[in-house]
Image (cartoon, grey):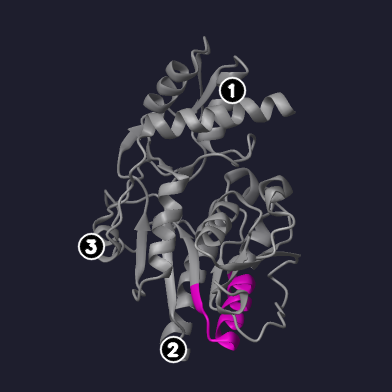
Amino acid sequence: MPARSKPISVVTGAAGFLGSHLTDRLLAERHRVIAIDNLITGNPANIGHLAGNENYRFIRHNVSDFIFLPEERIDYVFHFASPASPIDYLELPIPTLKVGALGTHNALGLAKAKMASFILASTSETYGDPLVHPQKEDYWGNVNPIGPRGVYDEAKRFAEAMTMAYHRYHNIDTKIVRIFNTYGPRMRLRDGRVVPAFIGQALAGRPLTVFGDGSQTRSFCYVSDLIDGIFKLAMSDFHEPVNLGNPREMTIKQFADEIIRITGTESTIEYKPLPEDDPKVRQPDISRAKKVLGWEPGVSFEEGIIRTIQYFRESLKRD
């Protein structure tokens, strides 16, 4: 395909866990990619393999500041920039709020100026500590706006509202993906999320830290499944939020037991108090994704976890 006829996609947060995998998928789909990241939580190692790729350009920039790109044509803007782990958004509360508000405004402004499609990476955290289970897209959520997690939850809720306003008022082609717990290679080992935390502790032979009694539930989706759903949503003409995640639900205690079994470690489990506003349940209803996108996850939990453990084993050897 001639370079001039290839779709051009902008990815904010492109050096992050999901942004880098999305970039790989877009390049595989013969897009040209303009990657933007200020590297506040992104990792240059996630995109090192793209150096020299003629269809890839990296710009170090904070999207909470105005975004200027000289390209006459941009086809897609994927807004994935944000601290996304509890450690990150508790340490960076104001940048988290700013990228959800100002960053989303700037990314939407870019999409409007270039007449591009806009895809927002939202989150299951918009549902807060849900009173409805499993969570469907028409549930408005149960969020504490002034709690420590509120900086992330409300930033994403505002981003969704801004996105729909641009769709309704400016007639921008917008999509919203609500991402449930996703895991896989390129996660940071010490980013505070349960998958890298448990794997890192198990590989080091340390106790696995379970908060509360471990009865709270999560649903884990392998990253390639998630990226496939995001790409299908971007190519669709659907504008309402869509849940993407794996509905296979398990308790944190069950998850810890599985990590111990699969790694073969002799680690034990250590219990600590549950953090404030930590959701008790989390499971996506993916009926909309099945109907609208023909999408559902295909990678089994065991297969995905084995791949992820292997990635962290190799990472620890390099470190």
Q: Camera-side residue: 179 or 227?
A: 227
- Please tell me which of labels 1 and 3 falls first in the chain: 1
Residues marked 1 and 2 touching at CB (< 8 Å)? no
Q: Is residue 104 magenta?
A: yes
Tag 3's secondary structure? helix
- Please tell me which of labels 3 and 2 falls first in the chain: 2
Q: Residue tagged by mark 3?
A: 291
The answer to whether residue 199 is above or below residue 248 is: above
Of circles 3 and 2, the one toward us is 3
- In the rendering, at what x and y percent does residue 225 appear? 40, 48
Residue at the image position 46 percent from the left and 23 percent from the top: 259
Q: Quadrant of the C terminus?
A: top right
The stretch of residues the image draws in magenta is 101-118
Residue at the image position 60 percent from the left and 84 percent from the top: 73
Tag 1's secondary structure? helix
Q: Camera-side residue: 233 or 159?
A: 233
Residue at the image position 43 percent from the left and 16 percent from the top: 261
Residue at the image position 51 percent from the left and 39 percent from the top: 184
The answer to whether residue 245 is above or below residue 57 is: above
Q: Which amino acid type is shown beneath numbered disc 1?
A: Gln
Give the crowd class for mark 1: few <14, some 14-19, many >=20 residues within 10 Å.
Answer: many
Numbered badge on residue 201: 1
Q: Residue tagged by mark 2?
A: 171
